[in-house]
Amino acid sequence: MIRCAVLDDYQQVAKSIADWASIEDRVEVTVFHEHMADEDELAAALAPFEIIVIMRERTPFRAPLLARLPNLKLIVTTGMRNASVDLEAAAARGVVVSGTSGLSSHTAELTWALILGLARNIVQEHGAVRQGMWQSTLGTDLCGKKLGVLGLGKLGGRVAKIGLAFGMEVAAWSQNLTQERADEAGVRLAGSKEELLAESDFVSIHLVLSDRTRGLIGAEQLKLMRPDAYLINTSRAPIVDQAALAQALREGWIAGAGLDVYETEPLPKDHPFRTLPNVLTTPHLGYVTKDNYRVFYQDAVDDIRAFLEGAPIRRLA
Ligand SMILES: NC(=O)c1ccc[n+]([C@@H]2O[C@H](COP(=O)([O-])OP(=O)(O)OC[C@H]3O[C@@H](n4cnc5c(N)ncnc54)[C@H](O)[C@@H]3O)[C@@H](O)[C@H]2O)c1
Ligand SMILES: O=C(O)[C@H](O)CO
């Protein structure tokens, strides 16, 4: 039997959500529900396995860990982009890395959950109702307000479209955004990042993390935002200087933030984002839906079958 490990199945759904029975005559699957952060623990637990299925970027596979996994032949990661797998080191060890497809609506929808949650103080009001109170905050209308979208790719484009449906004025900016793409999305191309930050009621980040986008929003940029504006980041934490963001929230440079992504995940227990009253946090839930997991895990099973049969496989570049 080929041994396969499935990592970080926090919700304990990996086995039931896909058709593993179709490969059970050849593959013995062990599912790990708890996150293992320690490299020694990972190396010891994973050394016997030929195949490892990983959920997004929860457990990094860099050269030192890969070197300690002598039996490893295939890594299946969910999605087709995973910055925490060292593809070169894997190739050097003869380990194939494949990816899965996935849906693209999920994170745009979570972005709107955060925007709506912030605009209508949903979490505070829910808590207050539970404690016997009635109407303790004033909400903000979205219709007629300005939404600034940083990065107009798949998710940014979808978020912009929903903003238009709410009757918002939508502008977008990124270093490589063209007038043609802005026209196609039906939004205004902002003259500069600074202009977009200064004028928006809600700024939502949908850039990929790269050398050009790391630290794109620091203290200087946060100070350009209005004190009644909100920042939403469901993209990647290091695009925003995290210490500057905590200061901005503490000192009221902006009204609040909706965050799904963090520099260290899981977010450390004593991190200020866990307690600041004007932060709405979700634990990197953008992609965590039944519908998307069904696609992720079924594709993982299909990748494993293809690999075992020598059929073409979706390799990560
Ligand atoms: N929270 C979640 O669970 C979740 C789920 C899926 C994706 N994401 C993140 O959302 C982000 C957007 O994903 P997507 O699928 O829309 O990606 P995409 O590739 O379709 O779009 C990314 C955007 O970034 C821009 N961009 C790329 N490189 C750039 C650079 N060097 N400088 C400036 N702009 C640049 C692109 O032009 C585009 O507008 C990514 O960071 C992704 O990791 C988060
Ligand atoms: O980029 C993504 O797909 C999500 O953030 C999960 O890692």
Image (cartoon, rainbow, N blue to C red):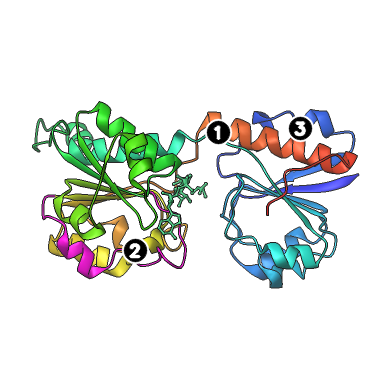
| Of the pair 32 and 219, the residue shown nearer to us | 219
Is 219 inside the magenta-drawn segment? yes
| Of the pair 60 and 229, the residue shown nearer to us | 229
Label 1, ligand 1: CB separation under 8 Å: no
Q: Is residue 278 visible?
A: no
| Of the pair 161 and 117, the residue shown nearer to us | 161
Marked residue nearer the N-terminal end (2 or 3): 3
Label 2, ligand 1: CB separation under 8 Å: no
Residue at numbered disc 3: 20
Indicate the amino acid at tag 3.
Answer: Trp
Residue at numbered disc 2: 271
Give the residue displayed 34% in from the left and 63% down from the top: 271
Is 222 inside the magenta-drawn segment? yes
Marked residue nearer the N-terminal end (3 or 1): 3
Q: Is residue 315 left or right of residue 240?
A: right
Q: Residue furthest bottom?
A: 64
Q: Quadrant for residue 15, please give it.
A: top right
Within 10 Å of the Cα at label 1, are there few (<14), some (14-19), or many (20+) other Cα atoms? some
- Main SS of the magenta part reads loop
Q: Which residues are magenta?
A: 206-228
Name above or below for residue 217 compared with residue 128: below
Residue at numbered disc 1: 292
